[in-house]
Image: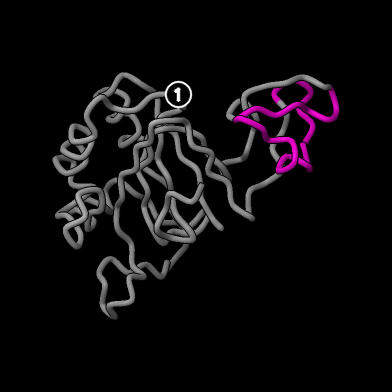
Amino acid sequence: MNAFTSNASLVIHPTEPDWTPDDPEVLIKFLQEAELAGNTLNNDKNSFLVGEKFLDHISFMGCSPNIKLEDESSNGKFTFVRITTTKNITTLTGKHSFAPHCPHCKKPEKNWRELLLDNRITCSHCQQTSDAWSYNWRKSAGFGRCFIEVTDIYPKEAVPQFSLLESLEKEFGVEWGYFFYHV
C-alpha cells in the first residue's frame, strides 16, 4: 500500500504496530504545539507546513542538505508533515527496502517480497514464522496504523531528534521509532 504522498520520506511511528491514537486530532494538536507541524496545507486536515521548531526536532545530516521548506515552484516538491492513520496494520516497503534479517537465525531473507504474507514471514533459512516487524529492516521499512511522514527526505538525509521521540512516548505511552520510505 502506498499511503504516502512522496517517493522518499522520513517516517516516525509507534514501535507497537497496532497502536494508533483514539483520536488523531490529539496527535495533530501535540505536533502543532511542539511546532514540528504548522498550519494545514491546502485544506488537507492531515497535511501541514513545517512548524517554527521543525529544525529543532529533525536533524539533517551532511554539510548542505537540499531541503525546500516551502512550495516555491508550485510543483508540490517540498518538505511538509503528513499524519496517516489506518484501520489495519499497514506494510510500508519500497523497492529500496533492504533484505530483512530474521529475528531467530539473524540471516538476511533475500526473497522477503515473495515470503511476506499477511504481515508475516517464514524464514527460508530456519523455517521460523514471525511477524514481519520483528525482522531487522535496518530502517528501510515499517509497519503500523499510525505514521508521521516528513516528505521529500531521502534515506539517512535526516533523523528525528531523540527528544522528539521521547516526548511522543511520554505523551502517548508507547515507544516511537523511525524508518525511511523510499520507492
Q: Is residue 114 magenta?
A: yes
Helix, strand or loop status at disc 1: loop
Amino acid on which the number 1 mark rests in the picture = Glu
Question: Relative to 138, is 81 on the left or the right?
Answer: left
Is residue 38 visible to the viewer in this orientation of the structure? yes
Q: Nearer the viewer, residue 24 or 61?
A: 24
Q: Residue at image x 45%, y 23%? A: 16
Q: Position of residue 158 (x, y in %)?
A: 43, 53
| Position of residue 67 in the picture relative to residue 133 (left or right) | left
Nearest the viewer among 161 and 84 is: 84
- In the image shown, does 59 or 139 lie closer to the viewer? 139
User: Which residue does the numbered mark 1 point to in the structure image?
Assistant: 16
The answer to if 148 sits in the magenta stretch is no
| Highlighted range, magenta | 103-126
Vertical order, 17 against 59 (above or below):
above
Q: Specify the quadrant of the image occupied by residue 27.
A: top left
